[in-house]
């Protein structure tokens, strides 16, 4: 039972996160702003989680409405309040299960972005702060977990939820974010789509 709860907890941690990048216009006399600078809103996110040894295979979709602002210095400000939940189903510890993750409140993650219309994002999760919470409900085994995202990121227990290393593309009005991470044997691939707000 403890092993199943551990697996469910990993699903929770892996599905909880969100990330983005923005863009802003610059005055003609000033240097042109990077495409990713500005405010964005998540339209949809897809997360795939796999751990062959623990028979963990989950696909989840959702997250619409989460707000993200990227400052010129690379700091990412997340506001999950009012965003839709991320829901998924699959196998966890050999059991057919469904998972719902509801994100709320705010999170700030300092970071660095390379490039303008495409490049890499590196989040400094050791400096993450905020009161963002992920409330996760798992059907089997029956379980409800509340996860403080900033604390999880600092302790290394975020399973790639808070962006650490990712790639992005920016068209000005749209932004996509792609990340693949491996934590404690769990591989997570996430793709986020955002629009400028």
Image (spheres, rainbow, N blue to C red):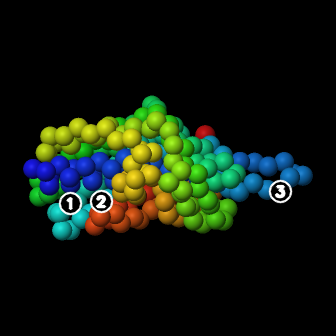
Residue 63 x %, y %: 41, 43
Residue 103 x %, y %: 39, 38
> Which of the two labelled residues, at mark 2 and mark 3, occupies the earlier sequence position?
3
Q: Nearer the viewer, residue 148 or 19?
A: 148
Count neighbours of disc 2 (C-alpha within 10 A) and say few if under 14, some if 14 to 19, many if 20 or more.
many
> Which of the two labelled residues, at mark 2 and mark 1, occupies the earlier sequence position?
2
Label number found at residue 31: 3
Disc 3 to disc 1, C-alpha distance: 48 Å
Q: Nearer the viewer, residue 55 or 42?
A: 55
Q: Residue at x 34, y 63 (%)?
A: 183
> Which of the two labelled residues, at mark 3 and mark 1, occupies the earlier sequence position?
3
Q: Is residue 145 left or right of residue 154?
A: left
Count neighbours of disc 1 (C-alpha within 10 A) and say few if under 14, some if 14 to 19, many if 20 or more.
many
Q: Residue at x 32, y 59 (%)?
A: 48
Residue 128 x %, y %: 51, 48
Residue identifier under label 2: 49
Q: Please say if 50 is above or below 195.
A: below
Residue identifier under label 1: 56
């Amino acid at each position: 039972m403890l092993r199943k709860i551990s697996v469910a907890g990993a699903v929770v941690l892996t599905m909880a996160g969100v990330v983005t990048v923005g863009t802003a216009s610059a005055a003609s006399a000033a240097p042109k702003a990077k495409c990713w600078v500005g405010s964005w809103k998540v339209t949809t996110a897809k997360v795939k989680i796999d751990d062959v040894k623990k028979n963990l295979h989950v696909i989840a979709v959702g997250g619409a409405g989460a707000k993200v602002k990227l400052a010129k210095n690379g700091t990412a400000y997340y506001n999950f309040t009012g965003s839709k939940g991320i829901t998924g189903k699959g196998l966890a510890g050999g059991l057919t299960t469904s998972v719902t993750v509801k994100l709320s409140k705010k999170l700030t993650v300092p970071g660095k972005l390379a490039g303008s219309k495409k490049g890499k994002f590196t989040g400094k999760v050791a400096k993450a702060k905020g009161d963002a919470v992920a409330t996760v409900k798992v059907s089997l085994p029956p379980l409800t977990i509340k996860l403080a995202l900033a604390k999880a990121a600092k302790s290394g227990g975020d399973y790639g939820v808070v962006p650490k290393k990712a790639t992005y593309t920016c068209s000005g009005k749209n932004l996509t974010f792609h990340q693949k991470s491996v934590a404690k044997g769990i591989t997570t691939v996430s793709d986020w789509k955002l629009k400028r707000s």
